[in-house]
């Protein structure tokens, strides 16, 4: 097993946000500012690495019948630790992240890596997998947050960088601006990595027999 491959796959090739499209809720909700995106990303990375470590260590002890509840308890423990640390040392950031900090417990990225990787692999690969995925998630949140903050407020990390004659575009700090920015970043990453859009066909569609488009499947690129 290539340890470097396990670490780097989550940065771009299998980026949780920009390629696998996981964790969209916190991505859109907290990326109004770059600082918020960075804070959420690092908190998630900490939980991801620690939960992968513990789950990998206990994979032979945890019964299959209660696997998911055990995973959630482990993850919730680390989320509680992160919440207490942020409340103590970075109260303003904790206030900005709000309920989305607690929702890290059920973040599909963390549960997905626990189920698909940590419970099936040794400790070091699991830690590297969590670190790579977490840093990839952090980078995507930071990039989206930076774009939205610069275009929406004329500032970045609390520093005014836009000239006085340029009016900030409030759209970018609204939900619609979040969707637009994230979509553009996903498109750029897809172009740079050569990821092609999936071709959708009528294969496997339960309505195939009665669908008027199914008969034209061979001559069209659409789907029913």
Image (tube, rainbow, N blue to C red):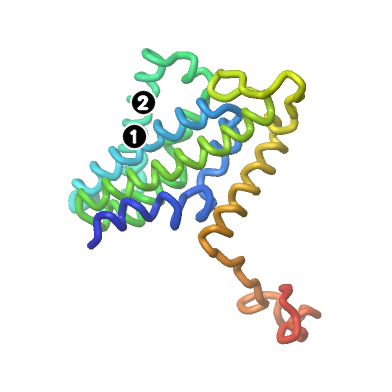
The residue lying toward the viewer, choosing from 79 and 91, is: 91
Q: Position of residue 35 (x, y in %)?
A: 51, 26
Q: Secondary structure at mark 1?
A: helix
Residue 82 marker = 2
Q: Measuring 54% from the left and 38% from the top, which residue is drawn there?
A: 143
How many marks overall?
Answer: 2
Q: Measuring 44% from the left and 57% from the top, which residue is drawn there?
A: 13
- Position of residue 178 relative to residue 35, above or below, is below
Q: Nearer the viewer, mark 2 or mark 1?
A: 1
Answer whether labels 2 and 1 touch (C-beta < 8 Å).
Answer: yes
Left or right of residue 26: residue 128: left
Q: Quadrant of residue 131?
A: top left
Q: Quadrant of residue 181?
A: top right
Q: Quadrant of residue 191?
A: bottom right
Q: Measuring 46% from the left and 51% from the top, which residue is drawn there?
A: 15
Q: Position of residue 10 (x, y in %)?
A: 40, 51
Image quarter (top left, top right, bottom left or bottom right) of the N terminus: bottom left
Q: Which residue is mark 1?
A: 46
Marks 2 and 1 sit apart, C-alpha to C-alpha, by 8 Å
Residue 172 marker = none
Which badge, 2 or 1, is on the more N-terminal residue? Answer: 1
Kindly tell me whether residue 102 is visible in this rendering: no
Q: Measuring 35% from the left and 40% from the top, which residue is drawn there?
A: 48
Q: Position of residue 52 (x, y in %)?
A: 29, 45
Kindly tell me whether residue 187 is visible in this rendering: yes
Badge 1: how crowded within 10 Å, few (<14), some, or many (20+)? some
Q: Position of residue 36 (x, y in %)?
A: 52, 27
């Amino acid at each position: 097993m290539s340890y470097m491959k396990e670490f780097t796959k989550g940065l771009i090739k299998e980026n949780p946000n920009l390629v696998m499209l996981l964790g969209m809720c916190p991505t859109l909700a907290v990326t109004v500012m770059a600082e918020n995106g960075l804070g959420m990303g690092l908190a998630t990375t900490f939980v991801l690495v620690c939960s992968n470590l513990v789950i990998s260590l206990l994979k032979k002890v945890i019964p299959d019948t209660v696997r998911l509840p055990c995973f959630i308890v482990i993850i919730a423990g680390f989320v509680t630790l992160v919440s207490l640390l942020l409340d103590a040392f970075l109260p303003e950031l904790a206030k900005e992240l709000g309920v989305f900090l607690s929702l890290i417990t059920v973040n599909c990225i963390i549960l997905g890596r626990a189920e698909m990787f940590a419970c099936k692999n040794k400790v070091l690969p699991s830690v590297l997998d969590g670190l790579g995925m977490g840093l990839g998630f952090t980078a995507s949140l930071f990039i989206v947050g930076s774009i939205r903050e610069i275009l929406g407020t004329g500032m970045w990390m609390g520093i005014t960088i836009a000239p006085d004659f340029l009016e900030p575009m409030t759209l970018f700090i609204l939900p619609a601006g979040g969707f637009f920015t994230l979509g553009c970043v996903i498109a750029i990453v897809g172009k740079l990595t050569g990821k092609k859009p999936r071709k959708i066909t009528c294969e496997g569609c339960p309505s195939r027999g009665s669908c008027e488009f199914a008969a034209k499947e061979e001559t069209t690129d659409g789907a029913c």
